[in-house]
Amino acid sequence: MAREASVERNTKETEIKLKLNLDGKGYSDIETGVGFFDHMLDGFTRHGFFDLCVRVHGDLQVDDHHTIEDTGIVLGTAIKEAVGDKKGIRRFGSCILPMDETLVLCAVDLSGRPYFAWDAGFTSEKIGNMSTQMVKEFFYAISYTCGMNLHIRVLSGNGGDGAAPGNDHHIAEAMFKSFAKALDEAVSYDPRITDVLSTKGSLG
């Protein structure tokens, strides 16, 4: 059976409907009202081989904060529901992904315990119509609602060691794609794992 979840969340700031299939083929149908964010979610979907349908109506007349953060909350909830009891999955996943001058590391542990580590930065305030500050907030929201350890680090292309800063579009896109690849690995099954992969015998 496909591991799927449908989640709705309605507040005074956002109305969100999201459907996720972890065992998909990379199909996306996404409308958040923030064009660059749609582009990033599409990349996450395609490179993780997930199926993702999202509809968001947010208070964009204010800014994009609630729309993006709340989408992260809902996506994290959907991942947690879709992955189920975690029996037989690899639990850990990681990816070092290059995009031109940028190199990004993402590592995931579906431990049930939330922790978010971030070592990255941007030089511009916006990419398209998306605030660069919201990239971090999006991944933070996912990690805490899903209950995952999530580490994201820009290894090169962030202006370190005296080098010129990289392209912010490349940095953000490499983050979303590396997260997709790491999550795809973490939720994949390994026939050698017959229960949950834990020395305690449980995750959470």
Image (cartoon, helix red, strand yellow):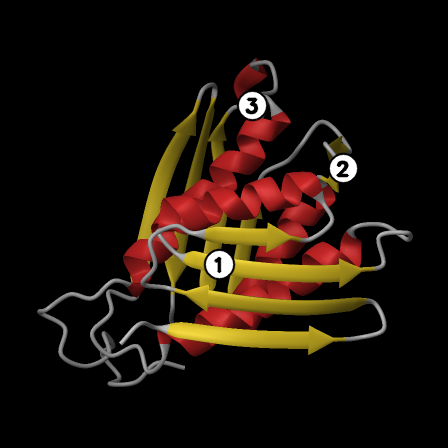
Quadrant of the snapshot with the N terminus: bottom left
Q: Earlier in the sequence, mark 3 or mark 2?
A: 2
| 62 on left or right of 95 | right
What residue does disc 2 label? Answer: 129
Residue farthest along the right direction in this orientation = 61
Q: Where is residue 86 shown, x and y percent of the image? A: 30, 77
Q: Amino acid at mark 2?
A: Asn
- The image quadrant of residue 91 is bottom left
| 113 on left or right of 55 | left
Marks 2 and 1, how far apart in space? 22 Å
What residue does disc 3 label? Answer: 160
Q: Amino acid at mark 1?
A: Leu
Q: Is residue 57 above or below residue 171?
A: below
Q: Nearer the viewer, mark 1 or mark 3?
A: 1
What residue does disc 1 label? Answer: 52
Marks 3 and 2, how far apart in space? 26 Å
Residue 162's disc is: none
Residue at image x 45%, y 35%? 104
Q: Secondary structure at mark 1?
A: strand
Q: Secondary structure at mark 2?
A: loop
